[in-house]
Structures are given as C-alpha cells and as structure tokens.
Image (tube, rainbow, N blue to C red):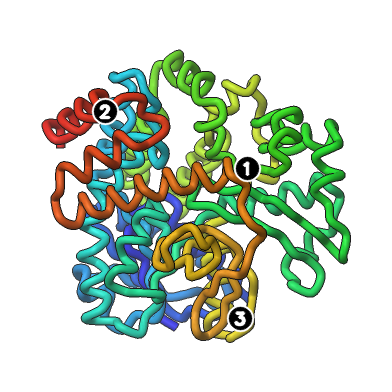
C-alpha cells in the first residue's frame, strides 16, 4: 500500500514511520511526504532515514512534488497539517488570553480560531482527494479533529475518519490502574468499553474485561485513581461525583478558573514553547549534517515535548510529573496503523474514532461527527450503540456541536455571523462582546 502524509514535515511524523517499520504485516511499501515547508520536510526525511538504518525491510520514503503528486495513487492519506504554523497557534492562544478567556489550541476561542483558519485548506484537500484518489481513505490527524473531519466529510463522506490518541490512552491508563490484563483490550471477546463524546470532549463510562466491570471499583479506590493521569487531574471526589472518567481535555471545562489562572501565571503559552523548541530543533537539525545527528536532536526534543504536555492543567491540579508510560510518545501512530489494518484486513476491530453519528446519539444529526467506539472493516468505521447520555454530558455535547457546526459554516461560506456565533456560544467564552473583539483581532492579525 502507498501512504501519503500531508504535513510530512511535522515533528511527530517519525512516530508514524517508526510504527510502520515495526509493523509485522509490512502493510505499507512507500510513504510519500508532502509539506509546504521544504526545509522542515527535508529534516524529517533525514530523521526517517536514520530510523530506517539497518532495518531489514525499510519502508521507502519519497518527498512529493506538490499536493496533486502526493495524492495521486495513494491508498491511505494521513492529514496532519498545521495551517499558519506555530505562529498561528501563538495568535490563537494569545488573543483570547488578552480578553481574559482561555487560550488553548483546540478548546475554547483558540480552537475556534484554529478551525476557521484550517477548514478552508482542509476542504481544498478533500476536493483534490475526491478528484485524484477517490478510493483512498483519509485519516485525519489535523486539529481541531472533530471540526475538521466534519468539514471534510461534506466532500468525502465516510471515507474520512478522524483519530485522536486521548481516548485510547485513557482506556489503557484506566485498565492499568484497575489491574487488568492490557492485552485483553485488543480483543472484543474479552474487553468492552463505553466511550462517547466529541473530539477532546468525551467520557469513559464503562470498562469491562473478561466479564468484570472495572469502573465502579476503580472509582471507589483513591490509591488507584491517584496512580494515573486523569485520576490526578480531576481528583477522586469529582470523578465519583460524575461517575465516569473524562477525557483529559475536559479539565478546561470542569476546572476553567484554575486552568486559566495557571496559564496566566506562566511567561509563555504552549504555542510559544513549541515555537521556540521546534523552531530551534529544525534550525539545528538542518545544520547538523546528516541523519544520525538529526535523529538524536529529534529524540531529545520529543522527550522534552512529552514531559511538558498539558503542563498548565497539571499545575492547576497540584502539579506532578507525567508517568513513564506516557512519555513513550505516539498514540496517533498506533491508532492510525490499527485503523489501516482493520480496513485492509476486514477484521471488525473496535477503535475509538471520529465518525458520522448515524443513530448513536439520537439528539445529534446523523451526519454530525462524534467520537465513540466503532467497529472497523473493509467498508470503513461504523459507530456502535452506546448507553444514553446523562443530561450534563448531552448538554455539553450539544453546545459544543453547535459551536463546531457554526465554525464549519463560517469557514465554508466566509460568514462572519456564523464565526461570531461559534465564538460567542462556546461555554469558555463569557460574553458576545468578548467574542466580537476576539474575532476582530484575529481578522487584523492574520
């Protein structure tokens, strides 16, 4: 199979390539990289060359000559673009903070601004895929993943599937904390879990292994809850109160004041940190002179990136170092590879994905993108039925889905009213006047 990675100069592309090298099925024969930044993609190609060094069956790597060249003949297309680069992310974070509301890449006003900038480019990509590779499957990594997948689905239908590593990470951490056999999670006959929501807004509400429901016992055990990321992040009392394990990004909603205070008290946003860190990496790696040096620099930078992930939320929750299991990196790569295997092998694998709702959440439109447990085979990904949502869960989902749909409408039709609605309706934006000022400042700085 031929795999194309859009955003091929992205910092995390080597994680995908490493997963392909470790794949015993040898599913992919060639990887094509496409990026608008020639220097970045050249550096990443050197890192991949070092990863392939000495491998008995390395996967061939090619740098595409333009978008159409990258798409033509592809069987799978990973979309991992960042429109506006890290400089755009800094604006997405700083503009809301200047108005006293949370600035974060995918959540709140920052997520809406990122979506407004990214969706037109994602739609163009979807149209070129439809024209040049209509049988290809698009796996969307691009954030805000739910919003971007919903926009691309207007063109590609069910052939675009969004992925995120947060839900699968939550399931694995919860199972480990409960003392379960992690190998059972790969088997639908042994393990079952109920996870539902939107991207970066979901809840693990049930987890059973070998017929035993693990969640009630886990929620009752302070020591077990304190052993993993989400347990420490949200606290035992709150988790028992809501009776579920939330996606880590719900910390921005449940503890908005504490997180905002933590962000305000730090000299740089996450975007500013990554802009300096990754900008420095690409500059040093381009001058390092060879794949070995580029790879060594990449590995050191990757570890520092993982150690500082969601540092503001951890600081707001009392502060702690990330678990060693969470510093391995990846997640997206493993989900993407499992998804490819399930489609090619027609296997019926169960994965948490961003797909069209159908009837899974009856209160949402059938074409609304939700993040939930799916069964995947050669026909694609189908969401499985889930237990009814509690009123608080459904209410938050409906409000954020209204934000996402307004943002897609605004970006598709250049509709300022829809853009203002997307910002003002977000629960982390506390005033339509604030939303209007954020929108105006974003328009004048782009």
Query: Around disc 2, counting alpha carbons within 10 Å, would you say few (fewer than 14), some (14 to 19), or many (20 or more)?
Result: some
Q: Is residue 394 above or below residue 24?
A: above
Q: Say which of marks 1 and 2 sits in front.
A: 2
Q: Label 2 belongs to which residue?
A: 432
Q: Residue at x 28, y 49 (%)?
A: 406
Q: Label 3 belongs to which residue?
A: 25
Label disc, if present, on residue 246 of the rendered structure: 1
Q: Is residue 157 above or below residue 195?
A: below
Cα gap from disc 2 to disc 3, whole angstroms: 53 Å
Q: Residue at x 35, y 49 (%)?
A: 404
Of labels 2 and 3, earlier in sequence is 3
As helix, strand or loop, the secondary structure at mark 3 comes to loop
As helix, strand or loop, the secondary structure at mark 1 comes to strand
Front position in the image: 176 or 357: 357
Front position in the image: 35 or 404: 404
Front position in the image: 69 or 429: 429
């Amino acid at each position: 199979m031929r795999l194309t990675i859009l955003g091929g100069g992205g910092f995390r592309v080597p994680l995908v390539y490493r997963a392909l090298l470790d794949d015993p099925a040898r599913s992919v024969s060639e990887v094509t990289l496409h990026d608008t930044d020639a220097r970045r993609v050249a550096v990443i190609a050197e890192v991949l060359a070092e990863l392939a060094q000495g491998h008995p069956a390395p996967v061939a790597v090619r740098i595409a000559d333009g978008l159409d060249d990258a798409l033509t003949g592809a069987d799978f297309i990973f979309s991992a673009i960042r429109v506006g680069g890290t400089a755009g992310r800094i604006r997405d974070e700083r503009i809301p903070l200047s108005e006293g509301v949370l600035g974060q890449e995918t959540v709140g006003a920052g997520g809406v601004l990122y979506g407004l900038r990214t969706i037109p480019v994602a739609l163009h990509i979807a149209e070129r895929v439809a024209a040049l590779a209509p049988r290809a499957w698009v796996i969307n990594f691009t954030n805000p993943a739910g919003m971007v997948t919903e926009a691309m689905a207007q063109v590609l239908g069910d052939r675009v599937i969004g992925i995120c590593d947060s839900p699968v990470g939550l399931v694995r951490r919860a199972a480990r904390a409960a003392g379960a056999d992690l190998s059972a999670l790969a088997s639908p006959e042994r393990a079952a879990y109920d996870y539902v929501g939107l991207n970066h807004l979901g809840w693990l509400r049930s987890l059973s292994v070998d017929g035993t429901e693990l969640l009630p016992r886990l929620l009752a055990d302070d020591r077990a809850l304190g052993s993993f990321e989400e347990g420490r992040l949200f606290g035992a009392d709150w988790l028992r109160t809501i009776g579920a394990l939330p996606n880590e990004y719900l910390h921005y909603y449940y503890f908005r004041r504490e997180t905002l205070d933590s962000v305000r008290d730090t000299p740089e946003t996450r975007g500013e940190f990554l802009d300096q860190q990754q900008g420095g990496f690409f500059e040093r790696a381009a001058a390092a002179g060879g794949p070995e040096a580029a790879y060594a620099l990449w590995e050191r930078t990757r570890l520092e990136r993982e150690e500082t992930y969601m540092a503001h939320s951890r600081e707001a929750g009392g502060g702690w170092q990330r678990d060693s299991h969470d510093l391995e990196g990846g997640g997206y790569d493993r989900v993407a590879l499992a998804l490819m295997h399930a489609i090619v092998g027609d296997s019926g694998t169960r994965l948490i994905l961003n797909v069209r709702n159908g009837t899974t959440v009856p209160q949402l439109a059938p074409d609304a993108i939700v993040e939930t447990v799916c069964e995947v085979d050669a026909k694609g990904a189908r969401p499985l039925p889930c237990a009814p949502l509690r009123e608080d869960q459904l209410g938050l989902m409906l409000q954020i889905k209204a934000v996402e749909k307004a943002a897609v409408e605004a970006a598709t039709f250049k509709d300022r009213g829809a853009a203002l609605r997307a910002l003002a309706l977000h629960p982390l934006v506390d005033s339509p006047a604030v939303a209007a000022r954020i929108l105006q400042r974003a328009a004048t700085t782009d």
